[in-house]
Structures are given as C-alpha cells and as structure tokens.
Image (tube, helix red, strand yellow):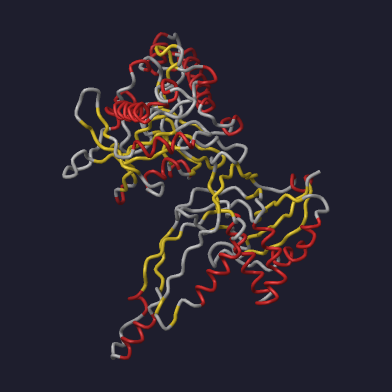
Amino acid sequence: MSFYLSITVRFLDPEPSFHGRGSTDAPEWPASPLRVFQALVAAAATRWRDKLFAEYARPALQWLEAQQPAIVAPTVAAESYGYRMYVPNNSGDLMTAAWARGDTDTSMAKFRVEKDVRPTRLNGEAVHYLYPIAAADPEFEKHREILVAAARSVTHLGWGVDMVAGNAGVLDDEAVAKLEGERWHPVADGSGTPLRVPRPGTLDALVDKHKAFLNRLGPDGFKPIPPLTAFDTVGYRRATDPVGRPFAAFRISAADPDDRPPAYDTARRCRDVAAWVRHATAEVCGRGGWPFEQSIAAFIHGHDPSDSTQPLSGDRADERFMYLPLPSIERRGDKGEHVGMIRRVLVAAPPGSREQVEWVRRRLTGQELTEPGGAPRGVLGDLQTSDWVLQRYVGESRGWSTVTPVILPGHDEASPAVVARRVEMAIGEEARQLVRARAEERTRELLLAAFRHAGLADELVRRAELEWRPVGFRAGVGLVRQYHLPETLRRWPAYHVRVRFPTRVRGPLVVGAGRYRGFGLFVSDPDANR
C-alpha cells in the first residue's frame, strides 16, 4: 500500500473561484505546486520567525521542495470571461499634492487605473496535493509535525481575495481514492498542462527575494526586485487528457520588409499554405542533415518509407508532422469575434517528438515560403507562445469549433448530397425520417472515430456533446463547399463541427482525414462554453 502526505487547501468563498495566473499570464488551474510551496513558506515564516524559522522550518521545507506531488482538484465550472475594475494605483500622493495646491475638487477617481480580473470558477472547494512517502520514512517523520503546522497556517492561495483554510495529513491509497475531483499526474514527456514546481534551491531563492524586497529602497535609490527563477515547469495530465503534441509556431511575414505582411484566404488557400510549409520543412531537413531515426519521407511527407507512392497507414499513420495554417481571431467591438485570414502557421508533431520540433523550429525561422517554381509567398518568423491568437488554438477549453471543416474518414453515406438524394428517393415521410436518422447516427459515429484517431481518450469522446452542419459556427467561417479541399479527400463527407467536452482539453485540436494539412482544425469557442 502506498502512502501520501496530503496538503489540502480549502477555498472559503461560498462560490469558490481562483484568480491566480501562470507564467504566461493566462488563468492557472490547478494552482501550481510552486504556488502552494510559496504559501507554505510564507505561513512558516509568519509562525516561526528569524532564527527559529532557520532551525525549525527550513529543513522541513527543503525536504518538501524536492518532492513532486500529484493533484486532486475540482473541475472548472465554466470558461472564465472576467471583468474590469478601476482601482487606485498607489497615487494618493498625487491627490494630496493637488489638495495642497488648493484643488479641492480632485478625488481618487481621477487616479484609478484599469485592472482586468478573470477568475476560474470551481465546482468544488478543496484541492489536495499528494506527495508520495514511504511507510514509516524516518526522514519524513522528522518533518511531519512542522509541515502539518505550516499547512494549517496557510490563509491565502493566489490573490488576496482567494482565502483558504489549509490542512495536512497522511493518507493511504484507499483514502486517496475517496477524494473528490480530477486526478492530475506529472508526466515526463513534456505534454500536458505546464505547472510550475519547486526544486532544490527554491526556498533559498525565495528567502533572497524577500531580502531584496526589504532592501529595495536605499541610499542609491530603488533597486528592482529580481523575478523568481529557481523553479521547474512540469506537464500535468488527467487520464482523459489527449497526449499533448509539441509544436512550433510561426508568424508569416512579408518577403520584402517594406511590404505589408501577407494574409491568405482560409477557404481558398488553407491547403496551399500547408503545402508551402511542408515544402519549406522538407527543404531545411534535406539541407540540414536530419539527425533523427525517422525518415524524412515518413516524418515530413507522411509517405511509406518503403513505397513513397503510399501514405503511412495502420499504427504508424500518426507518426508525422502536421502543417496547420491558423486563421486569425479578430475582435470586432460589439460584434464579437470574427475568424479572419491566415497569418500564422503551426507545425505540430507526434507526442514525444519535442527534440524534432525544436530542431525544425530553429531552421524554419527565417525560411521563405514558396510555391514550387514560384515567387516567395512569405517568410516564417518565430511566434511567442503567449500570442493571444495562438493561445486560442493551443490553450485549454471545454468548447471548440472548427475554422476548417472536418473531413470524415470515409463512407459517402454520411455525405449531405447522398443523404439528400436518398431522402428524395424514399417513399413516405416515415421512410424519409428513417434515412435522416440513419445518416445522423452514422455521421456521429464517424465524428467520434475521428476524435479517437486524433488521440483523445475514449471516456472523453463518449461524453462529448457534438453539433455538425455545412455552415460554420463562427462569424467569418465559410461554407464547407467553399473550401478548396485536397483532391484525394474531395469525395468524402465534410462538416463544420462544434464540440463541448466534460473537462477542459488542451489544443492543438485537429481531427479527421485532412488533419495533417490543416483541415478539421478547432479553435476555442466561448459560445460553446455557455
């Protein structure tokens, strides 16, 4: 039987929410192990001060910073939309100075600044951090009492409004199985939701940062406080999470610096942009001496290494790059979001291929996009992962909808044209209804199969809520018949799809027979989260 030190934080708000943000300033959930460790350090420093902290609490915290926990956390109630506040910005001196000059009409309202708040709404109140320990571990037993006392002194996690009650104890497997919430486990392949975790040396770095804060003002003026850098970032996954795909993101710039950046119509040029990026990737891999065991024919082009005229198939079908043009997501005031033209691209790889992605990222940056024998169509520039549009494709969301149609994996019987013809031929309303019902069921089966082929867990797929139609679900998304599909896939049925999962899923999410060429690409959809 296994045993765990369980550190629990219980949110006190009747409607629990969490305001903390991660290193990219995006809402963070679950709250990272580093955040909990910082809260424990603050609580311990308040409980045992100065020399007592160094002698009593430091050894226990140094033991804890070397451990890596699993997390049991509440599900997120809904996608967070946030709101804006106007708060004082430490400007009281400006107001009193105005009063001293006789300006009695001045008030603090003139010195308020905007502050955007985006809480994460929770379906539960308690988060459990489970640190594995050996039964009767003498090293842990030395620190057990101190860690429990420190945990019970924790009062906040996240922002000041995120008040919590902390606790700690030792649980066995049976007790852990009874905890309510989603199970998050660290993974070694770099996939999953990135969370910050402490490491040996984090405690010393926090102490040094606190000293820098206390001494920030001196005879030489203000000394900036350095950010905390002594931590690691680890991917955490739930059992229902798809295995994450490493990716390299690029912005398409103009070949001539004096020209405007190019933008390509999604419906007409998606397949072309994907082909240009694949061609550029093949060029740099051929010139740079591809150092990996996978063949260029298979990993770059998706061809069977033994027969270049045949695509990869069977268990190897997914062992290749995906070339994903990303239509822009534009905010248009009161009209909401609009799906625009292609200005970015993503090269995504199979799980566990981070080295291949990084190798290609370095060589593709600055590479020209060209049609075979044609003029340059643009230049690839590195795109930061914090880019707002990119995050709509690679971040987490429950609700997603397509910007390019999903091409179903075969079977004309699900095609709208075939269904319409069979309905017309049916005799009687009952027969027509039966044709439609069978087509609906078959389309749903094919869509679920497409999600499974893309690597999503069966439990997650079975609980997904699906909608499909020939018309897009977002403003700016074209009709399915307007898209220039790859010639080999034109005979198969295609639909725009909206999906809502029971839990948040991290992108990129791309499914269907055209997923290697940018078709079946989803973007997070706020309307699907309501």
Q: Nearer the viewer, residue 501 or 327?
A: 327
Quadrant of the rendered structure where residue 219 is?
bottom left
Question: Which of the two residues, 375 or 21, is positioned nearer the viewer here?
Answer: 375
Q: Quadrant of the N terminus?
A: top right
Q: Nearer the viewer, residue 238 or 277?
A: 277
The count of marks equals 0
Q: Position of residue 276 (x, y in %)?
A: 30, 28
Residue under the image location 28 percent in, 37 percent down? 341
Residue drawn at (42%, 18%), measured in percent from left and top? 303
Q: Residue furthest left?
A: 258
The residue lying at 38 percent from left, 17 percent from top is 489
Q: Is residue 21 above or below residue 456?
A: below
Whole-percent x, y for residue 88 in the image: 40, 74
When the figure is inspected, residue 100 is found, relative to residue 491, above or below; the finding is: below
Instruction: Single out the residue that lies furthest toward the right.
Output: 136
Q: Position of residue 466 (x, y in %)?
A: 49, 31
Q: Is residue 446 left or right of residue 99?
A: right
Left or right of residue 82, residue 375 in this image: left
Q: What percent of the width, then of the height, locates residue 107?
A: 35, 81
